[in-house]
Image (cartoon, helix red, strand yellow):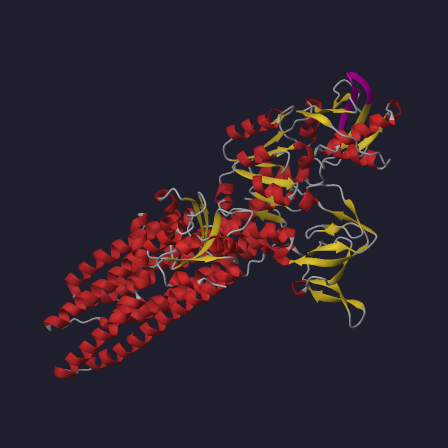
Amino acid sequence: MINTTTSKLEDYKYLDNSNFVDVYTSAESPLKMSFYIEGVHCSGCLGVLEDIPSKTDSIKSVTLNMSTNIAEVEFSGADCYSKFPQLVSNLGYKAYPIRDSSDAKNIKKLENKDSLYRIGISGVCAGNIMLLSAAIYSGAEGIFRNNFEIINLFLSIPVVTYCSFPFYKNAYSSIKALKATVDFPVVFVVLIGFILSTYNLVRGIGGVYYDSITIFVFLLLVSRYLIRSLQNKLVSDTDLFSSLLKDNKILKYDTHTNNYEFYPISELKSEDLVKLERGHRVPVDGILLNHSAVFDLSVLTGEAIPKTVLENSDVFAGSILDSEQAELKVINTGIETRLGKVLDKVKESYEQKISFEGFGDRYSTIFTSFVAFVSISGFFSIANIYGAHEALKRIVSFVLIACPCAFVFILPLTFGLSLKSAVKKGFIIKDSNIFEKIRSVKNIVFDKTGTLTKGKFNIIKWDKENLSVDDLSAVMSIESKSHHPVARAIVKNLSLDGFKLSEVTDLENIYSRGIKAKVNGHIYEICSDDKSAKIYNSISAVSNCVSVIKDGEKLSTIYLGDEIKDDAFDTLNKLSRDKYDIYMLSGDRKDNVELVSNMLSIPTTNSFSGLTPEHKIDFIKTKKGSMFVGDGLNDAGALLNADVGVAVQGSAEQSLKVSDIYILRNSLSSVLEIIKHANITNSTIKTNTILSVIYNVSAGMLALMGYINPLLAAVLMPLSSVLLLGSSLVGMSKNKGGGLQTK
């Protein structure tokens, strides 16, 4: 349901009423409300709306999604929800409170209908004016000429007022935001043309240009509507959840044939029964119907070790089946799944302001300022030589061609295509700003355990005979509180013996050494042992010795082995070849770190051992232009402080809170793909910029010289959009290919 009251009343106090507050806010975020903003068009609109918090203490923040026109507004307190739509109304826009995206889509349909009304009215008026003007140009004189020009005046009034209103509003908003907008020259052409024509008509001296003005407004409205429709269509097609799935089909139980048949995943509904094979990624949230099955839950839990799930237990989308077969009853599908909601938030975050931020905003500001200056100065210069009529005709053509609308609207499309392509490759990019940041990366810093190594420790040797059942239970209870790979290996080993967990108190993490806690009145320490002799076997590249100490007395030693990842050497070799400086940080002891650095040819001066999380943060802060690759949970601080943070393992939901990029497959070669992906995206944007400048400048010069009339300019304007769209599609198609080249 859409609240249409806001379109009729300027008083929005009803929004402070608890009946409305309950509808438009949630229990989780009672001080946040979403609004659809009608009339958002350019960077000027964005600047004005997001500057609202500086004008009132009632509003903490405003975040506008330029792709959907939805503003997420956070208020300072209750009973002030009416403040935002009132301020928006004062700025010339209309804010509609919405509950979800379906409300926004319905309002957008009404807004599109209004745009079509403007196009229709301007088209009818311009068509009739052109017919009457044709008679005047053919030689009509006397009363006929005078009456035709008066009729043209009245026909042009709705075009100059109602149909041109969006241009006036956007220009006014941009002035308040102190930003250049493409509508400055548009408003100049419309107003100067109308005022000059009316002045000449009243004085009876000739030089009436209502035909040029009205056809200009009509063609500009049509071009913008088509460009905007194209952008909305392509951006709305970016379905990250579907992109994550390799297949678009799944075996679903058919009640008519009493057998499993292939069905489109998009057609699944709640209560459907589906069957999965080994290696398939689960496309739904569901309940397991088998007695048991093994799933890799790393995308959602961060746990690298596959887990056995029992009958009637929840299985979430994104998990990978690690046993032969599994049958599920569907609970949620698509963006309603747990992973779907995570990806939807990523897409939402990604779309925020990408239409005009960063490079696109700088380009459009500079170029529109140039267009405005040339339009105003060019009109007077040409009028002085060839007359006002010829000057107006040439400036109309120039503004139509030189308007950078196409580039500004194609920019978010390029980012959207890049986002979708990235998910298909196995990594999620949270923020479009990352593409520009990756270009300035010089240092790539890796965590050791779980990043360069597999992080799946195997226990090579353990003298358990020196530990009682209570001691072993205590060790398992303490290590179950830790997320470190060593702790996971110990818990996995002991869980096979069926030990029960005991109560753990006074838990203390000893950075770079281990963990300490009290269980059953005894103090246990499970810490690295530098003095014990190291053991290596054929499958383990790294050996860790861990001692179990009870009340200060050493009882047992655990020997664990970890392996270097299969693609680690090749990845680091290619990065070094591409002139990146490679660093390794670890909380592990020095001899293990040196062993890994020697195996991967990392300079010993670039390898650091015994580091706490705080030490890693300090190191990252001193290395400008750095990408940090690590565990989304254990390396949260370093990921947050790096210029580019890449999480290679851990829960996607938690990792994306602290990192910029999350790798769905725990593979180091994805780092190469990320750099390649960013370089192709940046290259595509650069190509679009060059094409846009060449096209607009060359065609604009021809228009100013009189070789392009307004009608031809209107045809050429959408062609620039087609040109840039083709450039984006060709450029981003390179991201679909294989190969791991970087720069």
Which of the pair 676/298 is nearer the observer?
298
Residue 689 location (% of width, % of height)? 41, 53
From which residue to which does the magenta span run?
541-556
Determine the residue located farthest toward the front in the rendered image. Answer: 18
The quadrant of the picture occupied by the C terminus is: top right
Report if residue 339 is visible in the image. yes
**Left/right of residue 34 with respect to residue 608 in the rendered view:** left
**Residue 28 drawn above or below residue 272:** above
Q: Name which residue lies at 71% across and 54% down.
A: 282
Please provide percent x and percent y for residue 587: 66, 26
The answer to if 563 sits in the magenta stretch is: no
Q: Which residue does the image show at 48% across and 65% down from the upper left?
A: 106
Q: On the image, which quarter does residue 248 sit in?
A: bottom right
Give the side of residue 341 with respect to residue 354, left or right.
Answer: right
Can you give x and y, in whole percent of width and height, for residue 686 in the image? Answer: 44, 51
For residue 705, say whether it is visible.
Answer: no
Task: Tell me: 200 left or right of 709.
Answer: left
